[in-house]
Image: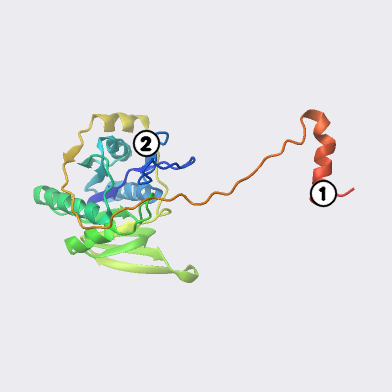
Amino acid sequence: MKILVCVKRVPATGGRIALTADSLDIDARYLGFTISPHEECAVEEAVRIVEAQGGSSTVLTLGPDAAGDQLRDAMAIGIERAVLLETDGSDWDPMATAGAIVDAIRALETEDGPFDLLLFGNEAADTGDFQVGIRVATALGRPAVSGIKAIEAADGRVVARREAGGGGWEVFELPLPVVLGVKEGLNLPRYPSVPGRLRAKKKEIIRMTPAARRGGPIKVRLRLPVGTESTVEVIGTGPEAAPAVVELLTRIGVVSR
């Protein structure tokens, strides 16, 4: 089983988000970077399938040189090979991104043979796009299903399941090669071990220079959601604050006298 996992380098948005001065990007000076939970599950699933059935696994991303960190994280948990479609870090729309990935897949398959399974995160963690995996599948002429939370691969076929309304499941049986968009909850991703990180650090990353396609949507600006203000009132300090606390709890109905 030959598996390719496509991931995207995105800001780790645990803190307050700020925009650049031109409102065209997230100001990432004080943010770390990661991949989405969906893609973490895709990477883990590729490693599990190869561990169980044999084969090979490759991880691919489009982004700046620094995106090599996310590729090495994937190799640290068991992905064998990494490919970086290196850019200057500027924003690529879904059409351009999918086109670059398709070109890379065709080049890799010409050299090493076709991939049986292409895994994508269900959507981009930063922009919420659901397009890239579907665009890649369409360009390559391969069947695709998104929203997947269970995969069984054997005998040249894949059985993929996604949740349906009412607590049921939709089940798809597909011939290889196939493209799947997976969701968080597919599995429980492992953490990279120290030996795994050391091994990943020594591995070479295949680098390609993609050609940008023009004609996709143009980003005009980003807008932060309207925040809600909150205030904090200090009603006292130390034991002397106890009467004030009792008075406050009584006023809001938590306790009664």
Horizontally, residue 215 falls left or right of residue 220, namely: left
Query: What residue sits 42% from the left and 34% below the top?
Result: 30
In the image, residue 202 lies at what x, y percent? 24, 29
CA distance separating discs 2 and 1:
51 Å
Q: Residue at x 82, y 35 (%)?
A: 242
- Name the residue: 16% across, 42% down: 209
Tell me where residue 200 sits by quadrant.
top left
SS assignment at label 2: loop
- Disc 2: CA contacts within 10 A as few (<14), some (14-19) or many (>=20): some
Q: Residue furthest bottom?
A: 166
Residue 1 visible? The answer is: no
Question: For mark 1, what is the residue?
Answer: 251
Q: Residues at badges 2 and 1 in contact (C-beta under 8 Å)?
A: no
Q: Which residue is mark 2?
A: 192
Point out residue 59 in the picture as x, y percentages from the top left corner: 25, 45
On residue 178, the disc is none
Question: Outermost residue toward the front?
Answer: 22
